[in-house]
Image (spheres, rainbow, N blue to C red):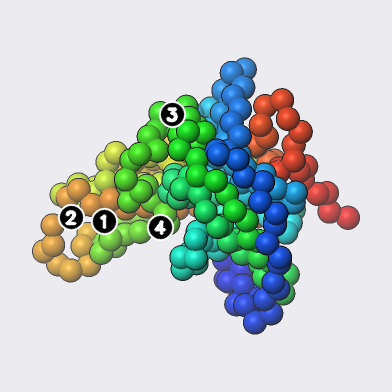
Amino acid sequence: MNRKSLWRTIGMACMALAAVPALAQDAGEDWDFGRDESRNLSIAAVTFQNFGVAVRCANDRLSVVVSGLPAGSGRRSLGWSLNGAADRTSQWVSALNSTSAFAVWPRSVATDLSHGGRLNVSIADGSRVRRYEVDIPASNQAVGRVFEACGLSLTTPADVAPSGESFVGLRWDRAPRPSLPNRSESFEAGLAGIQCTVQADGSLRGCRAESEFPENGGFGRAAVLGAHRSGRVSPIVQGESIAGRTISFVTNYGQLEGNYMESPPSRLPGRDEIYNPQRVTPN
């Protein structure tokens, strides 16, 4: 499903909202935490009977996964809020017909979730919107350990981490044109969420991949190299200083439909896979 089709589906679904009862709280004083040295995997998770949230560092890449969702593929829009705040819509990615989705901008999502409270999630489910409502505990320790495993700090101000695509009064003079990574030969498409610092001349430096899909497909590194090599922006208002501004954007490699993607591991080491079930094979 392309972006226009997805937004059309969500628009239609908003007219037929389906209320979902609040799930029973299964909160402790913190999230569960597990570490698997052999797989370079650290994960903090809070789970319920049919729903779960996990923050994970795998091979030095931070990710956030929500599971127990309606099955879907490729790019998806997920609405969520904490403690009655206004809903925000963010970009997520699922494998083929998967009930799990991974955040394109995981640092900001994980930082917010670590504060705990009443979590509301909504996502398109055919012609309806499926809603979830759960209480999650605050998690400075468990989520903080996952951040540390990825060389990050949970105490970093939230505005440092991108929560979506943002050009802060800038426009592309020359959009990055990255090449496909060599290791992507087995993949038909991919995407990467990128954050960069703008130089005085409009070039981009200090770029980093916030996420990439498929994971370990090389798309993040290729997008960073492309941004450094060819990306250039200019101010919408002529004459404004642009040095030091931070932009975030998504680099797409073809149409991501999820038909080639496998769900990366997201379970607590030594426990059953209860919030990232095996993908559903279509009939």
Rendering coords of residue 93 (x, y %): 60, 51
Q: What residue type is labelled 1?
A: Val
Residue found 61% across the figure and 64% down from its top: 122
User: Label 2 near label 3: C-beta < 8 Å?
Assistant: no
Residue found 50% across the figure and 49% down from its top: 116
Q: Which amino acid does label 4 sit on?
A: Glu
Which comes sooner in the sequence, label 4 or label 2? 4
CA neighbours of label 1 inside 10 A, class few (<14), some (14 to 19), many (20+): many
- Quadrant occupied by the N terminus: bottom right
Instruction: Report, in whole angstroms, how far the alpha carbon at label 3 lies from the one at label 1.
Output: 33 Å
Residue found 69% across the figure and 79% down from its top: 16
Q: Which amino acid does label 2 sit on?
A: Ile
Instruction: Report, in whole angstroms, how far the alpha carbon at label 4 lies from the one at label 3.
Output: 25 Å
Which of the two discs, 4 and 3, sits closer to the camera?
3
Instruction: Report, in whole angstroms, how far the alpha carbon at label 4 lies from the one at label 2.
Output: 17 Å
Which of the two discs, 3 and 1, sits closer to the camera?
3
Which comes sooner in the sequence, label 1 or label 2? 1
User: Label 2 near label 4: C-beta < 8 Å?
Assistant: no
Q: What residue type is labelled 3?
A: Glu
Which comes sooner in the sequence, label 3 or label 2? 3
As drawn, the label of residue 233 is: 1
Furthest-top residue in view?
A: 38
- Asked whether, in this view, residue 48 is left or right of residue 163, the answer is right
As drawn, the label of residue 165 is: 4
Rendering coords of residue 270 (x, y %): 71, 25
Rendering coords of residue 133 (x, y %): 63, 60
Furthest-left residue in view?
A: 239
Give the residue at mark 3.
148
* Total numbered badges shown on the rendered structure: 4
User: Label 2 near label 1: C-beta < 8 Å?
Assistant: yes
Q: What element carries label 2?
A: loop
